[in-house]
Image (cartoon, rainbow, N blue to C red):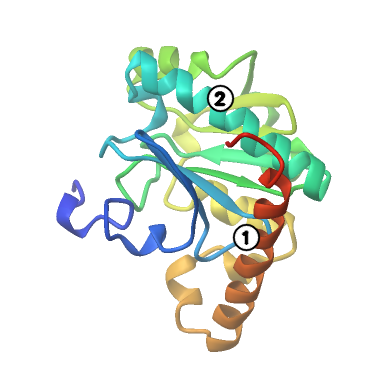
Amino acid sequence: MKQNKQACLHCPGGYALKNYLFVDDDFWIVCDVHPLIEGHIEVIPKKHISCMGALDDAAFDRYKELYKKVTDFLAKTYGDFGVFEHGITGQTVFHAHVHFLPFNKTVDDVVPEKELIKTISNLDELRHALKKDGKYLFFSIGDNKFLVDTKIGQPRFFRDRFADALGAGERGNWKETEKNEELMKTFDDEVKSLKNKWNKFFANKKGV
């Protein structure tokens, strides 16, 4: 069932947008409200679409620019990074959003099913996959990018796997974390730290 736009967490006024780092005409960059680790960021298009592969040409080009800027920030601030997008497959919020976070594990730590992984050379292949198959599962470890066979996709597929790889399985189910006051306090502290690091990183630059 499609999520009602008026109730969407990623549309204007949505809960997921409360800790934004940057906004332009097409995108929000925000701190994940329920981070898997300090430094967990989401890039969210303003247009209510299902996945980044469905963006028009101009917006997709801008997304690629923001992808590079966010991963550059993570690499220089935290050392290593991972990225994931469900791209319709296994979504629990039906508005495109991509997760970026510090991550120093391996591909095998996320998807040990090697026969179900395809290496891709660039983000444009997301658009090709969407056109061909109508969906995709995308992740990266550093600059290495991959598509995963969508037959193993399920709600929170990447969230749970990245959380487990980080030894933070209790953070995977964001709805359940809402019930944990101590963990929510930790999240707030991590968001504040991330905001400070982001602001310092971009303070002497012309902008994101």
Q: Which of 150 and 23 is in front in this view?
A: 23
Residue drawn at point x = 73 percent, y = 54 percent: 165
Q: Distance between the residues labelled 1 and 2?
A: 20 Å
Say which label, 1 or 2, has the lower sequence index.
Answer: 2
Q: Relative to 159, is 167 on the left or the right?
A: right
Task: Return the x and y of residue 203 as percentages of the image width and height.
Answer: 68, 47
Residue 112 appears in the rendering:
no
Q: Relative to 51, is 78 on the left or the right?
A: right
Which quadrant of the structure image shows residue 120? top right
Rate crowding at label 1 as few (under 14), some (14 to 19) or many (20 or more) other CA atoms within 10 Å.
some
Task: Return the x and y of residue 1 as percentages of the image width and height.
Answer: 18, 48
**Amino acid at pointer 2:** Glu
Which residue is under mark 2?
A: 65
**Amino acid at pointer 1:** Lys
Q: Relative to 11, is 73 on the left or the right?
A: right
Which residue is under mark 1?
A: 195
Task: Return the x and y of residue 40 as percentages of the image width and height.
Answer: 62, 54
Q: Relative to 131, is 163 on the left or the right?
A: right
SS under mark 2: helix
Task: Return the x and y of residue 194 as percentages of the image width and height.
Answer: 66, 60
Q: Nearer the viewer, residue 161 or 15?
A: 15
